[in-house]
Image: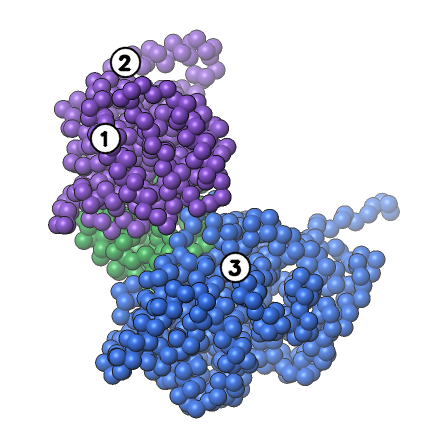
Amino acid sequence: MSLKGKRILIAKPGLDGHDVGAKIITLALRDAGADVIYTGLRKSPDYIARVAADEDVDAVGLSILSGSHHTLLAQTLDELAKLGAANIGVFIGGTIAPQDTQALLEMGALGVFTSEMSLNDTLSALEAALS
Amino acid sequence: MTTETKPEPAPAFTPSGIEVPVLVTPEMLGNPDPGLPGQMPYTRGIFANGFRGRRWTMRQYSGFGSAEESNERYRFLLDQGQTGLSVALDLPTQCGYDPVDIVASAEVGKVGVSLSNLAEMEVLLDGIDLGAISTSFTINSTAAIIFAMYLAAADNAGVPRASLSGTIQNDILKEYVARGTWIFPVKPSMRLIADSIVYANQESPRFNPISIAGAHVRDAGCTAAEEIGYTLANGLAYVNELLARGVDIDSFARRLSFFFYVHMDLFEEVAKFRAARRIWARLLQERYDAKDPRSLLFRFGVVCGGSSLTAAQPLNNVVRVGTETMAAVLGGAQSIFTSAYDEAFQIPTEQSAELALRTQQIISHESGIADTVDPLGGSYYVEYLTDRMEDKILRVMQEIDDYGGVVKAIEEGYIQMRIVERARERKRQVDAGQRIVVGVNRYQRDEEHAGFGEVFRQDPDNRRRIIAKYEAIRDRRDNVRTEKALKALASAAIHDDVNLMPLLVECCHAYATVGEMVGELKRHWGEFQEPPLRA
Amino acid sequence: MESPPRLSNRRALSRALTRASRASVADCLAAVASSPHDPATRIGITGPPGAGKSTLIARLAATRLEARARMAVLAIDPTSPISRGSILGDRIRMDTVAEHPGLYIRSIPSRNAHDGLADNICEMLMVLDKHGFDEVILETVGVGQADYEIRNLVDTVVLVLVPESGDAVQAMKAGILETADIYVVNKCDCAGAEQMLHDIRSVVDYRHVEPGEWRPPVLSASITDDSIAELDEAINAHSLWRDDHNDADLHRRARLRYHVESLMSRRVAELFDEARSDLLQRPIREVYAELARKLGEVL
């Protein structure tokens, strides 16, 4: 599996401070060949979208464990569209109730990856979504 | 063939990496006598009569949405026999933002209750006798403010401060490492903590002004030995901060308490608590020369659940929480929070929250494991593990000392890196099936998400109502008094030798908001800069 | 002061940079055929990892944006030789200025480049020239003396060191350490800063300086003082000095030479990637001849 040459932004939107998952996925993406930017904590959807657009990433991963995933996904997609960067896909990771997954996909999420998925499955799904 | 021997079993290890012998015999123990409970080095417990004197506090963490809704939930839990309140606060309150702040917009009232000012605190505690219960707040960077607000609420309710009991978490160091609700840089944060500890000693001596927490680093991925090692190192950093102010060790050490996660390896968890009690008592006596025996007592609360719970086959979590609760009781915890089985993916429903409380009630009243002190004391295996845990914990503490101390290790992202390494290792082991998690990598079902029961949904109108109340209080309050109180806070922030607590209490009485108080302090102190990801 | 005009075509710029960064050597050559734009002023910031280059750049950019409408920062991080992936971590150090409408920041992996720069860095700089930036700050990986090459691409080289970079200084002795235009000892509130300042000054003093030649200043900086203003002025002073003393033609030729060398070295890498797997089974002269022949083909 390879994400070689893909540019990916991993972001922590909102105020949730649990960042180990975001860091693990950042390292896993790097090890799969991707060029990864990690934002650090407490970034607004507006900031995340601007960085994504300026850096021209192929995808943005939002790591959310606070239960605010619907709002934060909607805001991020909206901000990306405003910047003419609607082509940048957004995927979600973190604590996501299984019954929420479908709704997030319908809203336009590229994928929903929880911590119980194996990293290999997550990376393969991402690779497929980005190819 | 009669000479054939059975093959040696494959070696087994605890999650901290201690090799587990097939059989432990007395010759394998350094000192087979663990001493007596209530005596140095307190391996077997801090009280001579264990739980026969007093049961642990059953303290369920809850709080969500508005103060009104949380108040209703608390009254329900108190009616059900709960003996202490544990208040979960929303992220804006934890990070020092008012509910109107743009960065807070998605999180108002989400993972806990929004407490932006004294009026909200009063609604939260309405009809609850503050002198009769103990209240624990999971709050860190704004802990001094929330503590001040609690004192102000007690003042207004006519409850003497001296009768208050409870805990604020107030442990900023682990926030930088694992939980992320920091605001200020390390130095002024340590000052705020020292201010609140000193003030609590004077004003409300039954209130625990700090609960040094290993729970979050554990949940983030580190081992049981690292959980204790990092937490004791943080604890010593607070002790040093207070000593540097010339405060006597025996005037505050007895008010320090700790907070951990319990995970599934039952004997290692028990050994972890026994080793921690022993190390802490010795450190306080030998290194810090504490004279008061109460200063040596390692008191701790626990959470059963956390990242050991799975979203897959959630009812399995009931068994996990039950097992972990037994480890907590056998390890001698002073208070226990049992997670709800659905906590891995949502805010617990009333039904799952009740089952969580029932779990510890069943263990307390039906299992009999709390009826004698340290029932595992003298078990060859448990004493063996306790010794080895002690070694491992001391090595972790040494590693941090060698790096240049816990503050440097945090500012430079060293401990953060260690935790990520551990978490990756654990993830790799689970992915590879080397560490079995039932329902996740073994015995999975295709129809994986069946059987959640009731799903808790928050009132979507919450944020609007919280903001309306917030606007109303800012109109209604005596703004001259508020301004004056905030100005006094700002000018005191520049001087290290002023205790900020009385000024914060006055701000709270004047209905200043959390965001306003934090804003004044931030202007002088700046904000913590996250170290970059190291790998 | 009036607020500077917003970069209107940011999205187009960011996509153009992606294309430039991924372009093959053939595409690069096709792109430079058109007439080049006037280059923006370029400042190179180099120094060992952990010297605080990104934070310093953020503060420097904020200062220089007071007098300029549009600035760009290209920040290069190392590509992992094992996975070929990278973590681009400089950007979050620049958050304090990231909101400025006149500032554009781009994170770049080094890929095959071993000189502290990145594949197609010349092409990316040309894209910035085309978009009319007043000034570009280029942050290198900071691998040691190899970062010497940056002087071919920029007008002013700033070397950032910290008191702990003693070993790095040893490693740089032969290259960048002796040729930077401005030296900054960062984190000067840490132990050992005085020693580091002293060491650098002695290296600089040892350099033989003819009358009229640029005499590199050695500055100290920390988070708490306003030393950024000093750095800002030093860069301006160097810029003025260059206007009078720099041999523009010599500099142009050095840039061209670096550009051609990097294209050729990338082309060699491309040829290895395209080659049949048995190429490296053959004797060295044959391999060389084969590659040289292919290099000779017009792209």
Q: Colour of chain A?
A: green
SS at badge 3 = helix
The residue labelled by disc 1 is C239
Mark 3 Cα within 10 Å, few/some/many (few <14, many 20+)? many
Asked if one can make out residue B239 in the rendered structure from this viewpoint, the answer is: yes
Vertical comparison of C204 with B412: above or below: above
Residue A129 is situated, as x and y percent measured from the top left of the image, at: 33, 47
Residue C183 is situated, as x and y percent measured from the top left of the image, at: 36, 33
Foreground residue, C133 or C180?
Answer: C180
Residue B92 is situated, as x and y percent measured from the top left of the image, at: 35, 68
Q: Quadrant of the N terminus of chain B?
A: top right
Q: Is residue B317 left or right of residue A21?
A: right
Foreground residue, A122 or C135?
Answer: C135
The span from disc 2 to disc 1 (Cα, nearest Å) is 41 Å
Tell me which amino acid carries mark 1.
Ser
The residue labelled by disc 2 is C297
Q: Nearer the viewer, mark 2 or mark 1?
A: 1
The residue labelled by disc 3 is B217
Q: Colour of chain C?
A: purple
The answer to whether dots 2 and 1 both sit on one chain is yes
Residue drawn at point x = 36 percent, y = 58 percent: B526
